[in-house]
Amino acid sequence: MEPSRDSWKWLNAEVLRFLSELDPYGLTPGASDGAPQDEYDMEAIPIASILQRNGTVTAEQVDAVWQKWFGEPLTAVVGREQVDKLITDLTSLGRR
């Protein structure tokens, strides 16, 4: 059974999906020769929490999460254009 779109589980899974698709470090989560499917879950959890609480997330908030886990903001890794696209995608989740 697929989780409800209003559930925490669904939101976290969708955030994880977007982060895995972006794959800033080229780890190919879920691929046979890649990282585990949930490679970016530790970053997805706080981002999903922000979305659940605020209905939106900012580039600065995502950069802060990335800074905590990787010692650098996501913007420095993939560039502002990619982060802006990610923010648009993530914000669409919080508004459903």
Image: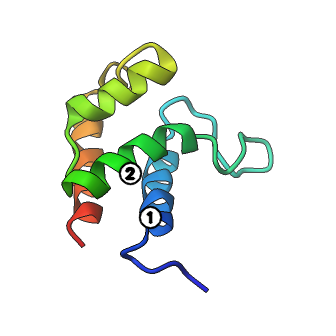
x 37%, y 44%: residue:
47
The Cα atoms of the two marked residues, 2 and 1, are separated by 8 Å
Quarter of the figure with residue 46: top left
Residue receiving disc 2: 48
70 with respect to 72 (left or right): right
In the rendered image, residue 80, in percent from the top left (x then y), is placed at 23, 30
Q: Does residue 4 lie above or below 9 as drawn?
A: below
In the rendered image, residue 82, in percent from the top left (x then y), is placed at 29, 38
In the rendered image, residue 68, in percent from the top left (x then y), is placed at 44, 20
x 52%, y 47%: residue:
20
Front one among 27 and 11: 11
Q: Amino acid at mark 2?
A: Ala
Residue receiving disc 1: 8
Q: Residues within 10 Å of mark 2 (few under 14, many from 20)?
A: many
Q: Does residue 62 lie above or below 11 as drawn?
A: above
In the rendered image, residue 55, in percent from the top left (x then y), is placed at 20, 57
x 50%, y 23%: residue:
69
Q: Residues within 10 Å of mark 1 (few under 14, many from 20)?
A: some
The image's mark for residue 35 is none
Residue 22 in view: no
Quarter of the figure with residue 58: top left
Tell me the element at label 2.
helix
46 with respect to 38 (left or right): left
Quarter of the figure with residue 76: top left
Query: Of marks 2 and 1, which one's residue comes earlier in the chain?
Result: 1
| Outermost residue, bottom side | 1
Residue 47 in view: yes
Front one among 77 and 41: 41
Tell me the element at label 1.
helix
What sort of colour scheme is used for the picture?
rainbow
- Circles 2 and 1, Cβ within 8 Å, touching? The answer is yes
Q: Quadrant of the N terminus?
A: bottom right
